[in-house]
Amino acid sequence: MPTLQGSLPPELANNVVRLYRECLRRATFIGKQQHNTELVVGMVRQQFKKHMNETDPDKIQKLKDDAARGLINHMLFESEKLTGRKVSQRS
């Protein structure tokens, strides 16, 4: 099963700490726009802490893919907002 992390730079996709930091950056950005930074950042932290002791490689890969998917979706959303055009999605 291919992973979504190919869409992210390898130094981010292969490193959980960097992925966590990027998720926190995006959460802060979104939170500032919606005036609920503490809540959004707290949700990201909670999800990473919840799975902090996971040891199953397949489960870890799925969690990383989910985080990558969230980052990619946010980047697409922001891109569409800036350009006013819908980014086509592959099926």
Image: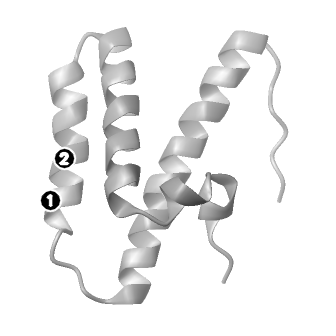
For numbered disc 1, what is the local secondary structure? helix
In this view, 43 is above or below 75: below
Q: Residue at x 54, y 53 (%)?
A: 69
**51 or 19: nearer the viewer:** 19
Task: Count the labels in the image.
Answer: 2
Q: The N terminus lies in which quarter of the figure?
A: bottom right
Give amino acid for label 1. Answer: Lys
The quarter of the displayed image where residue 56 is located: bottom left
Asked if disc 2 and disc 1 are in contact, CB closer than 8 Å, the reply is yes
Relative to residue 43, is residue 76 drawn left or right? right
Residue labelled with disc 2: 45
Q: Residue 15 in the image: state x and y as whole percent.
A: 41, 63
Residue labelled with disc 1: 49
Give amino acid for label 2. Answer: Arg
For numbered disc 2, what is the local secondary structure? helix
In this view, 83 is above or below 57: above
In this view, 24 is above or below 57: above
Q: Residue at x 62, y 28 (%)?
A: 77
Relative to residue 53, is residue 55 drawn left or right? right
Q: The C terminus lies in which quarter of the figure?
A: bottom right
Q: Residue at x 66, y 33 (%)?
A: 76
Return the residue found at the far front. 11
The quarter of the displayed image where residue 31 is located: top left
Q: Which mark is residue 72?
A: none
- Mark 2 surroundings within 10 Å by alpha-carbon count, few (fewer than 14), some (14 through 19), many (20 or more): some
In this view, 82 is above or below 22: above
Q: Residue 20 in the image: state x and y as whole percent.
A: 32, 50
Cα separation, mark 2 vs mark 1, equals 6 Å
Q: Residue 40 in the image: state x and y as whole percent.
A: 25, 31
